[in-house]
Image (tube, grey):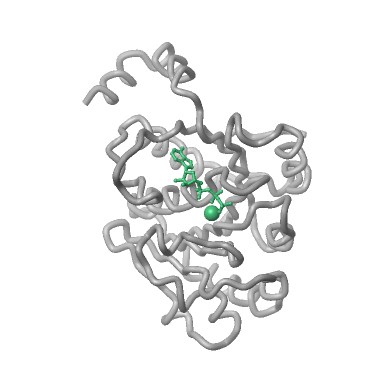
Amino acid sequence: MKIPFLDLFRDRQAEATDRYTLFQSKDQIFTEQFKNYCARFEYAIDVRGCKVVAISSAIAGEGKTISAVNLAANLASTGRKKVLLIDLDLRKSDLAKGLRFPSTPGMVELLGGSASLNEVLRFVIAQGLHVIPSGKLVPNPWGLLAGEKFRIFLQELRVQYDVILLDTAPMLPVSDTLVLRELVDGIVLVHRLGYTPHNLFRQALEDIGEKKLLGVLLNGVAPQSERYYQQYYGKYYIRQTEQ
Ligand SMILES: Nc1ncnc2c1ncn2[C@@H]1O[C@H](COP(=O)(O)OP(=O)(O)OP(=O)(O)O)[C@@H](O)[C@H]1O
Ligand SMILES: [Mg+2]
C-alpha cells in the first residue's frame, strides 16, 4: 500500500495556554512545523479535489483534535479558503472546551432536529474559522452518523465551504469513523510516534484504504529528529527558531 506522508510535528514545549489553541503557541518550531503541514495539506486537497476531510487515528490520544484545530485555524487564516471544523467525536469530545465554546447545542442537536445550523455554528473570529461542536455526548452515535440526515447536511455544507474538516473518534475502538469513510473525500491518519503499536497503525491504514487515505501526519517527533531539519534547512531553520 502506498502511504502518502503529509508532515510531522514535534511535541510542543509545555506552555500555560489552552490545550488546543496552539495556533497562538509561543513554541516557534511547533508553529513553523504546523504551517508546513498546513501548506502540504492544502496542496494535497487541491490536487485531489477533496473538500470533506476526516482527521482520525488508530487509537485515542494520538493528536487528532490538536491537529484538526490547528489545521483548520491555519487554513482559515490564510483567507484563501472558507473553512468549517466539525467535532464528530460524539462520544467523548472536548474540542469545544479546548476552544472555550459551549459544547451544546451542536451536531447531536442538529441531527436530532432540536437545533438549526445557525444555532450550532460558533466562530473563531481572529482566524475567520467556523466551528460546530459535538453537542450533548451520546453513547452510540452510529445511527446519527450513518443516517440520511447527516448525508444531506454534508451535501448542503459542501456548497457553502471550501474545506470541511471532521475531528473524529479513534478508528479501532469504535466504528464511527468507518461509517464516515464513504461520506468523506479523504482521511488524514494522525500517528503518535512511540505511543501507538505499529500493528494498530497498520490496521487503521488498511481500514482507511489507499483510495481514501489523504496522508499520514506524524505527531510527537522527538527533538533529536530536528537535527534533520537543521542539517538540511540550515540557517533558515535556525534563524526562525532562534527568534
Ligand atoms: N505534539 C504535541 N505536543 C504537545 N501536546 C500534545 C501534542 N499532541 C497531542 N498533545 C496532547 O495530548 C493530548 C491528546 O491530544 P488530542 O486530544 O489532540 O488527541 P486526540 O487524538 O484527539 O484524543 P482523543 O482520541 O481522546 O480525542 C492532549 O492533551 C494534547 O494537548
Ligand atoms: Mg480528540
Q: Vertical placement of 5 versus 71: above or below?
A: above
Quarter of the rendering containing residue 118: bottom left
> Residue at left 35%, top 37%?
14
Q: Residue furthest top?
A: 231
Residue 137 x %, y %: 57, 71
Closer-to-camera residue (160/93): 93
Q: Vertical placement of 197 versus 177: above or below?
A: above
> Residue at left 60%, top 84%?
112
Q: In which quarter of the image is the N terminus?
A: top right
Left or right, 40 with respect to 2, comes to: left
Residue 62 x %, y %: 57, 43
Q: Vertical placement of 133 versus 29: above or below?
A: below
Count of numbered circles on the image: 0
> Residue at left 40%, top 35%?
12
Quarter of the rendering containing residue 204: top right
Q: In which quarter of the image is the C terminus?
A: top left
Q: Vertical placement of 223 versus 33: above or below?
A: above
Left or right, 68 with respect to 26, comes to: right
